[in-house]
Image: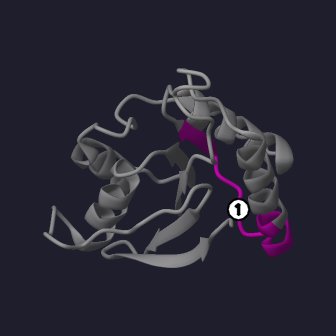
Amino acid sequence: MIYLMRHADAVSDEVDPSRPLSARGREQAARVCKALLKAKAFNPAEIWHSPLARSVETAALLAQGLSLAAPLVPTAGLTPDDDPAPMAALLMREKRDIAVVGHEPHLGVLASMIVHGPVQHGVFYPFSKAGLLALSTDGRKWRSEWLVRSP
């Protein structure tokens, strides 16, 4: 299983250029954790995240809120403007359950590439802030399994 999660709400660049999570973002992460605890359907081997503060903090809150033993792994190729193709290839070869905390538009294109193959014009999975999409495979084809959205 691959879990793709967009970072929670962050403060604006004017408030803090490093863009940490806002109070609303921390609440969003807590609500996602509550939904995942209730579903008992989330136990990644690792949590990969972009190096940007909002993703680092979202990943940490996810691990903490779910009492996960999964290590947090800063991962190249997950910033908003990175090419998602190398990450899609890497994730599709991965045998373990991996959670990825990143950004739009990268995540939307990444999800599309995993499910539909190389870039198809007009196919995009939009992620709300703190939204999490679970993808699974039967060994040949990938499909979306479930989605958690946070208001």
Judge left or right: residue 110 versus residue 1: left
Q: Could you say where residue 23 lies in the image, as x and y percent from the top left?
A: 78, 42
Judge left or right: residue 36 versus residue 98: right
Regarding residue 69, the answer to whether it shows in the image is no
Residue 35 location, quadrant: bottom right
Q: In which quadrant of the rendered image does the C terminus lie?
A: bottom right
Q: Could you say where residue 26 lies in the image, as x and y percent from the top left?
A: 77, 44
Q: Could you say where residue 115 lies in the image, as x and y percent from the top left?
A: 32, 71
- Above or below, comparing residue 14 to residue 33 in the picture: above
- Above or below, comparing residue 7 to residue 57 in the picture: below
At 84% from the left and 63% from the top, the residue drawn is 34
Crowd tier of the residue under label 1, counting other residues whose Cα lies within 10 Å: few below 14, some 14–19, many 20 or above? some
Which region is colored magenta?
A: 35-48
138 inside magenta stretch: no
Regarding residue 16, the answer to whether it shows in the image is yes
38 inside magenta stretch: yes
The kind of residue tagged 1 is Phe
Q: Nearer the viewer, residue 64 or 124?
A: 124
- Above or below, comparing residue 54 to residue 9 in the picture: above
The residue that disc 1 covers is 42
